[in-house]
Image (cartoon, rainbow, N blue to C red):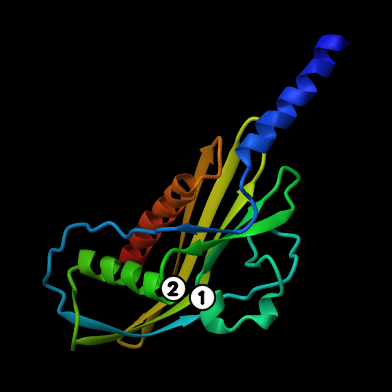
Amino acid sequence: MKSRLALYPLAACIAFTQVSCVVGTREIAIDVPQGSRPGGRGAATIGKVSDSRQFQNNPTDPSTPSVDGDASSMSAAQRSRYVGRQRNTYGKGMGDVALGGSATVPEKAKEIVAEALSREGYQVGNGGNSVSVDVKKFWGWMTPGMWAISLEARIETVVTVGGKSVRAEGYGKNLCQTATSGNWEEAYRRAVEDLISKIQAKL
């Protein structure tokens, strides 16, 4: 019995280490990797990019956007920076995860869609097909565990090209030991690549 009891402080210590630094705002960078650009599909211009994400205060589902505070008191511009929520050992929402610098979700979604169009042969810039983007989901969340945590990210967009709309969702999951900025970024890297491939498949 004594040996079993001795494990509890160790487990608590490990759990604390996994989800430490959960207060305040963690800033991350979400990069959009460049692939091949075959050309041949004409030109395209991305115009309006809307952020339709719905934030809630204290949601029961961690995949629902929320902030450490009252989301309704924030402007749309302020909410546009937030892309995730940190949690403590018990899964309680704590600090926020935001894009670094002046980056916003609409700007990042525009980059992702531009990359998908470029990989499909479009010359993205001025003229050609008119493209609009509506961001339905762009969120990352943490699920604490005893020996590891999972960081997940989901991005969903509705892309309209020349009057035709396609809905695509990208998902990424990173099993890791600590919720560092790098590990959050890895979950998003996988979600971004998945979304690009899904948009390509539907264009």
The quadrant of the rendering that contains the N terminus is top right
User: Which amino acid type is marked by label 2?
Assistant: Thr
Q: Are marks 2 and 1 in contact (CB under 8 Å)?
A: yes
Residue at the location (61% across, 34% down)? 148
Label 2 CA crowd tier, 10 Å (few <14, some 14–19, many 20+): some
Which labelled disc corresponds to residue 80?
Answer: 1
Residue at the location (49% across, 50% down)? 184
- Given residues 186 and 5, the one toward you in this image is 5
Residue 63's image quarter?
Answer: bottom right
- Given residues 195 and 177, the one toward you in this image is 177
Residue 43 % position (x, y): 17, 81
- Given residues 10 and 197, the one toward you in this image is 10
Which labelled disc corresponds to residue 104?
Answer: 2
Label 1 CA crowd tier, 10 Å (few <14, some 14–19, many 20+): many
Q: Is residue 166 above or below residue 147?
A: below
Horizontal side, residue 30 vs residue 19: left or right:
left
